[in-house]
Image: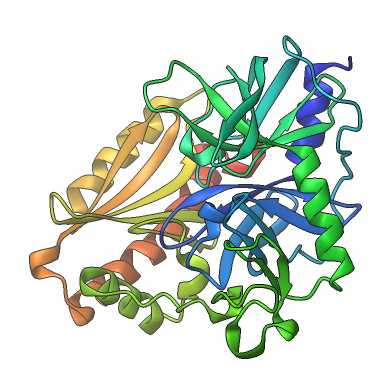
Amino acid sequence: MIGLSSILETYKKVLVQIATPYSTGTGFYLADYNIIVTNEHVVRGNRKVVINNDFFKKQLSDVLYLDPKFDLAFLQPPSVQLTRVEMQTKPLSAGDEVIAIGHPFGLKFSATNGIVSNLNHKQNDIRYIQHNAALNPGNSGGPLVDGLGHVVGINTFIIRDGNNIGFSLPVELLRETLVEFEAGGRSMSVRCLSCTNLVQQGAAEGGYCPHCGSRVKFPNQVDEYEPVGINQTIEGILSRLGLGVDLARVGPNLWEIIEGSAKVYLTYHEESGLIIGDSFLAQLPKKDIGLIYEYLLRENYELENLSFSVKGKNIILSLIISDRYLNVDTGEIQMKRLFEKSDLYDNILVERYGALWQEDLNVS
């Protein structure tokens, strides 16, 4: 056994946040194969996904491999060198301690301890590791790790209302798949659901599996995402403001924009019909907080369509627009003002009032 803190510190440099217009999840980097591993259901319906980590800038990554049978996907890694972790070689036993690690978009790094309860849970003829390390939907695609810090599985699904009953794909199936992928020259591939053979794109004539003749669709053949309705309007505004829409998408009805030192989240709440822009600025210091509150109250009195609030230690500048009144022209004016004011206020709060930059607090 090695220390839990040491394991977690290593995996902070390996975990990758993944986001698409449909979902968010976790992936992890395997240096021995120079690939990012995640679940197929996390990246489903996307040719490219947004990846992020504290050690490289948010960027788009190509989906290289899809495996709907084992719920696996491989992604193009970033160009920066990440930490190496190993896959377990000795078999697990019931009662072994495991750690489920995840890093959903917008949330802090999380890890939960548990015990292996069953090594032979079968679903759709696939054997899974059953354990009680708490999982949430954003943990999908993250690693299940043993006490030595070795990957023993990929967190795949939970049972609803199952009191922390989680299931992870055994690392043996991942290792076998990686060997097949490497043998195929790391070319764009998919596992055929009918015959379960791994098929390289160059071997599939007319899009059919060469082994059984079933139709197969490769990652670069997936229909590209096209926003509709209010989402289309929001993305039209972001495009007019010169922002990279593909990189901004970080989940269903959610966009993340970095404006200078501020991070802005735009969220469309369909039930209420509200588009809310929350800009997370600097954080409250330990001393002279009253001066900051006085400043925020004065600014709130003067601001038009924007307002300050404090949640915990976070200072937030917000914009609220009803979808009934949203159009590209008026929306562009209001969102541009939010983005510009966010960067301006961030500097004022830190330089004049002693607030703390987010990055100075090691917030992940």
Nearer-the-camera pick, 47 or 187: 187
Nearer-the-camera pick, 250 or 146: 146
Question: In the displayed structure, would residue 248 be above or below residue 97?
Answer: below
Q: Is residue 227 left or right of residue 76?
A: left
- Residue sitting at x 51%, y 20%: 165
The residue most toward the top is: 95
Q: In which quarter of the image is residue 208?
A: bottom right
Question: In the displayed structure, would residue 281 be above or below residue 198?
Answer: above
- Residue sitting at x 76%, y 13%: 96
Question: In the displayed structure, would residue 65 be above or below residue 103?
Answer: below
Residue 357 visible somewhere in the drawing:
no
Q: Quadrant of residue 91?
A: top right
Q: Is residue 239 left or right of residue 106?
A: left
Where does the N terminus fall, quadrant-wise? top right
On the image, the x and y values in percent for residue 241 come to 39, 79
Q: Is residue 74 left or right of residue 182?
A: left
Where does the C terminus fall, quadrant-wise? top right
Q: In which quarter of the image is residue 97?
A: top right
The residue most toward the bottom is: 206
The residue most toward the front is: 212
Question: In the displayed structure, would residue 360 be above or below residue 346?
Answer: above
On the image, the x and y values in percent for residue 11 come to 77, 36
The residue most toward the left is: 324
On the image, the x and y values in percent for residue 205 come to 66, 89
Residue 76 visible somewhere in the drawing:
yes
Q: Is residue 320 left or right of residue 205?
A: left
On the image, the x and y values in percent for residue 43 come to 54, 59
Nearer-the-camera pick, 207 or 277: 207
